């Protein structure tokens, strides 16, 4: 058993922020499924929203966030995040992040994105996430109190509730505290062995669940691991029906999930049909700068109405020098596919982009389980409501990474009890992997078709029926064979898919990112969707194989 003060599962901006802000006084471990920089944060293009100019205000930022959120944002949390934005940016600058400056170097360049009333997006050209991620990861790698476990994937959380319920300790030695997280089981992908990591505090910073959909702007690691593990451990989740589809993903057979930043529209890019006609003025008064849910639905409507494969984003009215200065990576990537965006419009389609719901937390990132935190896209803090305002995601990582670190640092030191080890004595090697690959493909396809931008009761019912069938098949496979990275991710994706569909079924209205053709009304009283954990332990009682870890007698 390895032991740390703080175990952080996930290596994106939220996890790195918490690690650096707590490592001076704590022994920290970061578990990363691939390399430390293989995270959704590294893919973020646009920037980070913060009030940095005299003509803007905190009230404006709060108002824009609440408007985009469709009435479901927590006002107090939204104000807390907006008020801490400037300090978060200053912290990044102090770490060495090089944000883009104006041509005369007098100030940082601020851009504007959909839903924002002012220019308040600070950025590093069109690769802000990469600049932030690489800067912080270098500091993490060289910090003496931080251990980084790359190519490791968390299997499940270890909690007092699970230990006592499964009766895997000798009678009379049960832990009597309220349900508390004690650490996690983690698979070393290079050896295939599961290690036990004990921690006084465990932090879920695993990102979102974009890979539950066939088309997504997310990296392959975005499989909803933190949300699924927290749910299985007994945490509530909220607002899972609100999956944000980014309006503009590059449409090209060889361009895997390449995002065209919202900043392109912020700098004057126009959406057009194949014949060059604009269509956004017919859908919203804010036109191309409407919030993402509005723009994505408009594109989806036009594609289905006209039977076209994509629409086009046109920024050819800007000079080449402007495009290369503001969007160097987008320009180079498109050019590699034969698309010179200074001369021709960019073919784009919507794609799953951001999970607005997640594990319910308070304003310090604390979950329903003691000593378990959730930060970043994994969490539902109340900031995003029914639709995330552009460039509030990296900001949320920074603010809640700091808040959770401060809460962890304020706690007294405790001794971790002995934990049960992972037992594979009753499972065997899988005879074939086709179930995993086939189920993964089927899940992503029907989630795209049935639980996408526009939904119906019938589509949702069909999706839930298929999820239950696949879940039972995968559960049987999981219980009898040794685990692998792909099996862990598939198990988590099925759980998250079920949470998304159950949440969507329960919302009998259209709001924000959830649009139902059967319930087009907008109720006057916005109510969050909160799912309580099912009677999960009754399922555990029927599990076998490595699902029943134990300690020596």
Image (cartoon, rainbow, N blue to C red):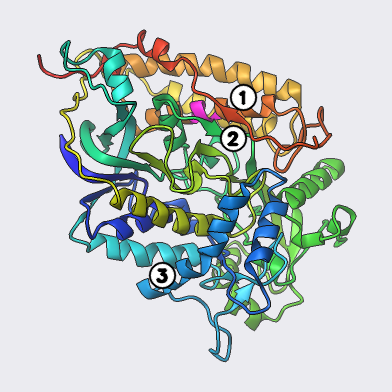
Question: What crowding class fits label 3: few (fewer than 14 Cα within 10 Å), some (14-19), or many (20 or more)?
Answer: few
Q: Residue at x 68, y 36 (%)?
A: 452
The residue that appears at 44% across and 21% down in the rendered structure is: 435
Q: Can you say which quadrant of the picture contains the N terminus? A: top left
Q: Residues within 10 Å of mark 2 (few under 14, many from 20)?
A: many
- Left/right placement of residue 528 relative to residue 225 reads right
In the rendered structure, find residue 240 and report the number of the disc placed on it: 2
Which residue is at 86% across, 42% downward? 305
Q: Nearer the viewer, mark 3 or mark 1?
A: 3
Of the two numbered discs 3 and 2 on the same chain, state the one appearing first in sequence.
3
- Magenta segment, principal secondary structure? helix
Label of residue 91 in the image:
3
Among numbered discs 1 and 2, the one appearing first in the sequence: 2
- In front: 495, or 329? 495
* Among the 4 quarters of the image, the one containing residue 527: top right
The residue nearer to you, when weighing 241 against 328, is: 241
In the drawing, what numbered circle is on residue 502? Answer: 1
Query: Disc 1 and disc 2: Cα gap in Å?
Result: 9 Å
N-term-proximal mark, 3 vs 1: 3
């Amino acid at each position: 058993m390895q032991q740390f003060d703080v175990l952080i599962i996930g290596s994106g901006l939220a996890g790195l922020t918490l690690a650096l802000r707590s490592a001076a006084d704590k022994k920290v471990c970061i578990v990363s499924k691939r390399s430390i920089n293989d995270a959704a944060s590294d893919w973020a293009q646009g920037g980070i929203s913060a009030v940095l100019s005299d003509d803007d205000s905190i009230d404006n930022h709060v108002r824009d966030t609440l408007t985009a959120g469709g009435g479901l944002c927590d006002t107090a949390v939204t104000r807390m995040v907006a008020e801490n934005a400037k300090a978060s940016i200053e912290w990044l600058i102090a770490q060495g992040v090089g944000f883009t400056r104006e041509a005369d170097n007098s100030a940082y360049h601020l851009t504007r994105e959909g839903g924002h009333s002012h220019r308040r997006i600070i950025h590093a050209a069109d690769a802000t996430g990469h600049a932030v991620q690489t800067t912080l990861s270098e500091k993490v790698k060289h910090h003496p109190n931080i251990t980084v476990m790359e190519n490791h994937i968390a299997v499940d959380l270890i909690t007092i509730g699970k230990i006592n319920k499964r009766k895997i300790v000798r009678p009379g030695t049960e832990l009597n505290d309220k349900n508390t997280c004690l650490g996690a089981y983690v698979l070393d992908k290079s050896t295939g062995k599961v290690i036990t990591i004990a921690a006084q505090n465990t932090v879920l910073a695993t990102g979102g669940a974009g890979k539950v959909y066939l088309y997504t702007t997310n990296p392959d690691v975005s499989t909803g691991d933190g949300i699924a593990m927290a749910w299985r451990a007994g945490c509530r989740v909220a607002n899972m029906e609100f999956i944000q589809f980014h309006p503009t993903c590059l449409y090209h057979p060889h361009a895997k999930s390449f995002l065209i930043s919202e900043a392109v529209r912020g700098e004057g890019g126009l959406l057009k049909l194949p014949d060059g006609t604009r269509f956004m003025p017919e859908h919203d008064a804010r036109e191309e700068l409407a919030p993402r849910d509005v723009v994505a639905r408009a594109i989806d409507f036009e594609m289905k109405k006209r039977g076209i494969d994509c629409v086009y984003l046109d920024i050819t009215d800007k000079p080449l020098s402007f495009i290369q200065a503001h969007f160097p990576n987008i320009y180079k990537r498109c050019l590699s596919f034969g698309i010179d965006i200074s001369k021709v419009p960019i073919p784009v389609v919507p794609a799953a982009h951001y999970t607005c719901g997640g594990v319910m937390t308070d304003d310090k990132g604390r979950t329903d389980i003691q000593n378990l935190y959730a930060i970043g896209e994994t969490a539902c803090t109340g900031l995003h409501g029914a639709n995330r305002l552009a460039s509030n995601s990296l900001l949320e990582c920074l603010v809640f990474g700091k808040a959770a670190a401060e809460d962890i640092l304020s706690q007294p030191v405790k001794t971790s009890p002995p934990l049960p080890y992972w037992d594979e004595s009753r499972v065997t090697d899988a005879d074939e992997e086709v179930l995993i690959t086939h189920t993964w493909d089927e899940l992503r396809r029907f989630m795209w078709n049935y639980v996408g931008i526009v939904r119906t009761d019938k589509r949702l019912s069909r999706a839930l029926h298929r999820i239950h069938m696949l879940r039972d098949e995968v559960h049987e496979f999981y219980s009898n064979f040794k685990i692998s990275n792909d099996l862990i991710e598939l198990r988590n994706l099925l759980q998250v898919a079920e949470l998304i569909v159950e949440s969507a079924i329960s919302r009998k209205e259209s709001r924000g990112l959830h649009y139902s053709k059967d319930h087009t009304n907008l109720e006057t009283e916005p109510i969050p969707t909160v799912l309580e954990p099912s009677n999960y332990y009754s399922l555990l009682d029927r599990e076998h194989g490595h699902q029943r870890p134990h300690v020596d007698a």
